[in-house]
Amino acid sequence: METAKLREASGRVIVALTAAGRSRTTIKRHEAVFNAFAGFVEARGQGLPNEADCLDFIAERSGSRLGSLREPTRSRHAQLARRPLILLMEALDGILPQVGQPTSPLIENCPATFRTVRDEYLAACRQRGNAEASVTTKQRAADQFLAYLEEVGRETLDQVQAQDLAGFWVRLQRRSYAPKTTGSLRSGLADFLRHLAERGQVQEDLAGRLPPQRYPRRGQLAPYPWKVEEIRLVLDKIDRQSAIGKRDYAMVLLTARLGLRVGDLRCLELGWFDWRAKTVAFSQHKTGLPLTLPLPGDVGWAVIDYIRHGRPEAGCRQVFVKHRYPFTAFGSSTSAGCRLRYYARRAGIVFPPGRSHGLHSLRGALAVAMLQTDTPPPVVAAVLGHATTNTTAAHYLRLDTEHLRGCALDVEDVLDVEKGAQS
């Protein structure tokens, strides 16, 4: 009888997950946890499980002992085991499983001593017109620095010295962040330190004490040379029956066919589509310049399919949203571009080192395809939204190997010319 109730509750969770548009992979992962947990409870020879049983099961599966089901943890294995059990316990209590709700309260990384100063700084950033994604990056840098100050015994900001900044920077370097991440943290920390100096909250402006930080821009890495067959293979690996799959399919298709930047994908609004004229018009997130592109039929229907059958009810105007409560639009600090790499792995595509392979790399594939069909560079620049053809030449003409082969010089001809010049 108790086993039947447990399986019935598990079934209600699966129904809730399906209604929320979770992928088949996510549903199968929940089912696996439910089956394992049912065996775990049955082996104990008791009735319906309680929270202690859940914690014992999580500890056995992940090796992490939690004090409560909603205790914050950094263990991914514990999180994967805990999330299905929270929904299961809600179903057993007769509550509708709250799919997408956070499983634990957000972790506050800033010490309470400095929290007021941090919040005043973030308010000043928003007042200056900083984007919310920029505010998030600056908060991360400020929180890490303030947590270090508390650790080394600084009780007030006027006690901060250059040696504290040096010690924090050494610790930051030991964490082996990617160069771009380190550069972003340095920029955010410098802005925070300048803010403190302007408000007179520190004895000196320590921003100038930060070491110079150079990191490679994405454009300096050659994008992966996608083939048409590979892009089709990736698209075939997307589960278009799930809500997330419908979203990802439309995003990849928009980038592959129209060359949209990731920033424009995040900002794309439904009102920017002209379905009668079969175009999409918007101001580019990067340059601010207007751009109108034709909308192929398969791309338009992919967007319509997502809006009608996949997109959850959200309070934002953007077409593409995160499928986790509260269903907000993608910010620049969220990795919308990582979805392509996920499906490429499923398709068995291996990327060589030194090649960028996010969504942005599909712009390079589109540019090369257009150049190889003898599309004039000004047209390529217009489609990609470049302000001048110089940008197109600098980043994409070098990838058109077929035409570059026609520019190659014969070595023997060069040697003959040099011999004639010497004589």
Image (spheres, grey):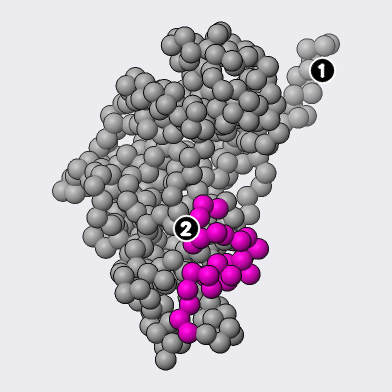
Residue picked out by circle 2: 70
Of the 4 image quadrants, the one containing the C terminus is top right
Quadrant in which residue 403 is drawn: top right
Q: Residue at x 51, y 60 (%)?
A: 68
Residue type at the position of mark 1: Lys
| The N terminus, quarter of image | bottom left
Left or right, residue 3 beside residue 213: left
Residue 385 colored magenta?
no
Q: Is residue 177 left or right of residue 292?
A: right
**Disc 1 on helix, strand or loop?**
helix
Mark nearest the camera among 2 and 1 is 2
Q: Which sits in the foreground, 206 or 414?
A: 206
**Mark 2 Cα-neighbour bin, 10 Å: few <14, some 14–19, many ≥20:** some
Q: Residue at the location (57% across, 57% down)?
A: 76
Above or below 82: residue 37: below
Spatial separation of the CA atoms under disc 2 and disc 1: 79 Å
Q: Toward the viewer: 13 or 376?
A: 13
Pick whichever of labels 2 and 1 is earlier in the sequence.
Answer: 2
| Type of the residue with mark 2 | Arg
Percent across and percent down for residue 178 are: 62, 36
Find residue 337 and report its horizontal and vertical position in percent: 47, 45
